[in-house]
Image (spheres, rainbow, N blue to C red):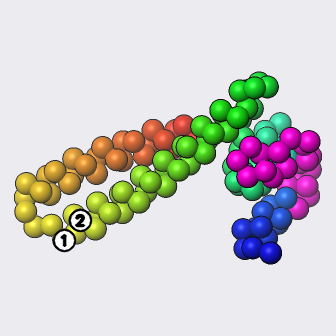
Amino acid sequence: MKRGDEAKLKRMVDLLRSGATMLPDVCPICNSPLFKLKSGQIYCPGCDKRVLIVKEGEELSRVTQIQVIAELSSTINQKLMELNEMVKYENDADRLYELGRCLLTWLEIFERVKKLQS
Ligand SMILES: [Zn+2]
């Protein structure tokens, strides 16, 4: 069994223990069974994410959207780390200014993505 599968299985057990119910629907991204939490939220233990189901038919696009946001978030994290490294070793004032502006832009996008995720 892969590491990821083990973590997924553990999450599924935890979900059931917490009173969540397994739904007949599967996640269109990872094919995991979806769970309905006590709070009424739908959760995918495979993606380890909340799944927003607006209405039948729109489900796939909503889930895809969540996936895109998650990927975007990790790309931004990566870029911020790269920029941070560049700033560390840059001595040229103009370049530093440029990098600073760049950082600000990415941070702003990061904030917005975080808002979308919450
Ligand atoms: Zn999933």
What residue is drawn where x is 79% and y is 41%? 42
Asked if disc 1 and disc 2 are in contact, CB closer than 8 Å, the reply is yes
Taking the magenta stretch, the answer to whether it contains residue 106 is: no
Residue 99 in picture, x, y percent from top left: 20, 54
Per the image, label 1 sits on a secondary structure element best described as: helix
In the image, residue 19 lies at what x, y percent? 92, 50
Residue that appears at 63% across and 39% down: 64
Could you say whether the residue bearing mark 2 is in a helix, strand or loop? Answer: helix
Quarter where residue 58 is shown: top right
Name the residue: 35% across, 57% down. Answer: 80
Amino acid type, residue under disc 1 in the picture = Tyr
What x and y, as percent, mark residue 18? Answer: 88, 54
At which x and y percent is residue 40? Answer: 83, 36
- Label number found at residue 86: 2
- Along the line of sight, which residue is nearer the eye, 2 or 6? 2
Q: Residues within 10 Å of mark 1 (few under 14, many from 20)?
A: few
Note whether residue 98 is visible: yes
Image quadrant in which the N terminus is located: bottom right
Q: Residue at x 10, y 67 (%)?
A: 91
Tell me, yes or no, if residue 38 can be seen here: no
Residue that mark 1 sits on: 89
Classify 83 as above or below 34: below
C-alpha distance separating marks 1 and 2: 6 Å
* Amino acid type of the residue that numbered disc 2 sits on in the rendered structure: Met
Q: Which residues are magenta?
A: 13-33
In the rendered structure, the answer to whether residue 21 lies left or right of residue 66 reads right
In the image, residue 88 sits, relative to residue 37, either above or below, namely below
